[in-house]
Image (cartoon, grey):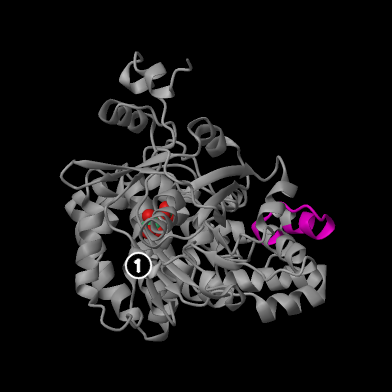
Amino acid sequence: MELSSTSMEAGLPADEKRLGRSGATRPGPGIVHLGLGAFFRAFGAIYVDDAVRGSGGDWGIIGVSLQSPATRDRLAPQDFVYTTVTQNSDGGETFRKVEIVQDVLVAPENPEAVLAWMSDPAIRIVTLTVTEKGYCHDPATGNLNLDHPDIVHDLENTLPKSAPGFLVRALQWRRDAGLAPFTVLTCDNLPENGKLVRRAVLDLAGKVDPSLADWISAEGRFPSTMVDRITPATKPEDIERLAQKVGYRDEAPVMCEPFRQWVVEDDFVPAHGADARPDLAAAGVELVPDVTPYENMKLRMLNGTHSSLAYLGYLAGHETIAETVADPVFAGFVKRLWREEIMPSFTPPEGVELDAYADALFERYSNPSIRHRTWQIAMDGSQKLPQRILGTITDNLDAGRACPGLMLAVAGWMRYVGGIDEKGQPIEVKDPLAAQLRALSDSVETADRKVAALLSVRDIFSSRLADELASPVSRAYDLLAAHGARKAVGDIR
Ligand code: CS2
């Protein structure tokens, strides 16, 4: 008689029991997801799972890692099942076993297999979380960067490397097979993210085959979305704690806060009719005609302050966002940023009360169970600053409103990418432009020359911003260098 896996494992210590499927019917695949990191597994996958549980439909997810095999290698032995750990502010945790991911492919190992899935008739949506830099665009203008090495590669080869490359080639395969396109549903924190990915795809398709670009432009759909859930990176101790609590070992759990919000433009490829999307509304997704006001609010209010707290908090020696806002100086700073510099800069979505939104953000940041490292959020600042902070600064300049707090945040980023902290220790700066930024900062001595050198990076700062920021950011940089971040933050009025 064969032993069932449960009885085979019955004698093992609890934390060595393997995680696997429950035996429930698996939905057929309907979505390919590019960039299967922790965020999507704690976010989009949960909404899709809820939609399938509530309303049915074949919306199983085929995950794709565009770079490393690490996620696949952890998930494959547990049949792509994983646990979400929702961390409440009272220290309690709730666990959910998620079975919606059906397989994970690693693109560099077999790009053809990825294209084959993306052009499978069952696939109607391709979702993406490839981070800001994954779109290979120029952050200051939004144009596709034709000099990006992956784009150069994708123009010369039919098996792509970049996310836009996979979208274009898969859409080409589908057109050539007489299939309707998939809906491209981006879930990255970029303004007008649907328009941005559409532009990248059309720019690249136009170079590959202009008639393909025409077909995509007519038939394709790229709804914009606003995504929100704080998802700190999983740490080894999270894996151990989970094993002790649930009695099985999960090598790839994801940590998240209780809050989540997904706002999506209801614009999916019409050729797929009633099967164009899962029943997202039933799963709590807000389907709206225009997502822009939601995106502006979230990028400026949440991500703008997240990044400001990340650079300045890191320099002041704070490890996490919760620790940073537990420091009264930073709590006052972030509240002032919202009230005086960010809230006046944009029009909120109808019916949203911004004071309440800011209060709720402060509560979320203060959740002590969420150990979201300032270092993690500080990553890729060159790609994040424009939509998180520089747009707000531009609108304030236009309105003649001073914004010393945001100027200090930009100066904080400059100190951070300079690579040395306030104790003289090296900072591990993760950014596609890290080497260039460090070299610029090191090339000159004085604060105003360092600021001028960094402001000359046109991928980030327009020439207008470079002119207007030169003196306020130099002053802020001086304060940081002379007194340290904590004092500089406390002195902002
Ligand atoms: C954070 C975001 O890492 C970061 O840059 O600001 O990931 C943030 O936690 C999410 O956008 C919250 O929805």
Residue count near mark 1 (Cα–Cα under 10 Å), binned few <14, some 14–19, many ≥20: some
Q: Is residue 247 visible?
A: yes
> Is residue 160 within the magenta segment?
yes
Q: Which residue: 78% across, 65% down? A: 177
Query: Looking at numbered disc 1 in the image, what kind of residue is underneath it?
Result: Ala
Eyeballing the image, is 39 above or below 8?
A: below
Eyeballing the image, is 293 above or below 163?
A: below
Image coords of residue 305 (percent x, y): 34, 62
Q: Which residue: 62% across, 59% down? A: 122
Our reading of the magenta stretch's main secondary structure is helix
Image coords of residue 246 (percent x, y): 28, 31
In the image, taking residue 197 as reference, residue 375 lies left or right, namely left
Residue situated furthest bottom in the rendering: 399
Q: Quadrant of the C terminus?
A: bottom left
Q: Which residue is mark 1?
A: 282
For the record, the magenta segment spans 151-165
Image coords of residue 206 (percent x, y): 77, 73
- SS at mark 1? helix
> Is residue 122 within the magenta segment?
no
Place residue 9 in its image quadrant: top left
- Seen from the viewer's position, the closer of residues 315 and 369 is 369
Residue situated furthest front in the rendering: 1
- Seen from the viewer's position, the closer of residues 95 and 256 is 95
Question: Ligand 1 shows up in which quadrant of the image?
Answer: bottom left
